[in-house]
Amino acid sequence: MRVGLAIPPVGLPIDLCLDVVHQAEERRFDSLWMGEAWGTETCTMVSALLARSQRIPIGTSIISIYLRPPTLAAMQAATLDLIAPGRVRIGLGVSTRNVNALHGVPWDHPVSRTREYVSILRQGLTGKRVTVAPEGKFYRPQGFQLGMPAPAHMPPIYLAAVNPQMLQLAGEIADGVILAWLPARQVPDSLAEIARGAARVGRSLSDIDVGCYIHTMITNERAQALSQLRRILVSYCQANTYIQGFRHFGYGDILDEVHLRWKAGDRSGAEAAIPESMVEELYVLGTAEECRAHIGRFMQAGVQMPLVASLPSSRTTGEDLYALLEAFGQ
């Protein structure tokens, strides 16, 4: 059973993060992943955790392709591999228009931009001079070549994907995919999209490592947990990347009501418009046994590597991470 552990990018103390990595190694977690939004910068944290660990692969989940050019991503990936050869996983994604706005960066052409980005990143990681395809229109590196030894083995590249076009692109060009914010019942449809993209280039679904980011909360305080989870979920309901996915998953009427109340300035009403059933499908919560059973349903649906993640909230504590270590360690 492969289970990864994800640490949220909310500035948790470094001593805590290091202890979590050491325990994840001891408890035989498959891998550890660090996120990024507008808090902790993922490559800096990953480098620190790689330097202070021995065996566990550590990945970025995810690097936003809008916040750094692919040549810089190649430099960062090669540097991480220098610190811990063979243990680096590169997770890429397009984040959301809302997050880009915080950084003052436009959000455009997510699929075609990602295709071009991955091509340049892979070229850069070979150590050879990067050449740009004639059809490329987003990045124009001129004579870039790594000024350091290239990794002996190409770090695997994972694409974060929610919607059909990005899922298909992952099937075409990625080593792995990181699903997110979907119910277990939706996994087979997502896998079908990945397989469709893979088939276009002579690959199959078995060629792609299927991970899934699953926010998980070990708790006996159900009512309090539901309230906290609604507070987080209502913000994701405003994010363009997830709005499309949520509608596809059957939450369209719920979103309409949430948006109506949100635009009226009624955040509490918007949270209340999210039914318990939606929270229970998009999060995993409850006792350790209940959470393991729910994660099991994702795996039965076809997820090969669930990434159990503590909540992306300033309220997340070490106790939350230790509970995940205890519940999912082997």
Image (cartoon, helix red, strand yellow):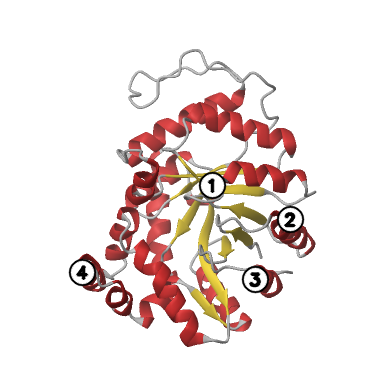
Closer to the camera, 61 or 163?
Answer: 61
- From the image, tell me which residue sits under label 1: 207
Q: CA distance from mark 2 to mark 3?
A: 15 Å
Q: Secondary structure at mark 3?
A: helix
- From the image, tell me which residue sits under label 4: 256
Q: Quadrant of residue 266?
A: bottom left
State the image coordinates of residue 118 (x, y, percent, origin top left): 47, 34
Marks 2 and 3 close (CB-CB < 8 Å): no
State the image coordinates of residue 278 (x, y, percent, origin top left): 36, 76
Q: Earlier in the sequence, mark 3 or mark 4?
A: 4
Q: Earlier in the sequence, mark 2 or mark 1?
A: 2
Q: Residues within 10 Å of mark 3 (few under 14, many from 20)?
A: many
Q: Residues within 10 Å of mark 2 (few under 14, many from 20)?
A: some
- From the image, tell me which residue sits under label 3: 324
Marks 4 and 2 close (CB-CB < 8 Å): no
Q: Earlier in the sequence, mark 4 or mark 2?
A: 2
Closer to the camera, 182 or 186?
Answer: 182
- From the image, tell me which residue sits under label 2: 18
Q: Quadrant of the N terminus?
A: bottom right
Type of amino acid under label 2: Leu
Q: Earlier in the sequence, mark 2 or mark 3?
A: 2
Q: Quadrant of the C terminus?
A: bottom right
Q: Earlier in the sequence, mark 3 or mark 1?
A: 1
Type of amino acid under label 1: Asp
State the image coordinates of residue 164 (x, y, percent, origin top left): 33, 52
- Circle 4 or circle 2, nearest the eye: 2
- Circle 4 or circle 1, nearest the eye: 4
Q: Earlier in the sequence, mark 4 or mark 1?
A: 1
Res 165 label: none
Q: Secondary structure at mark 1?
A: helix
Q: Secondary structure at mark 4?
A: helix
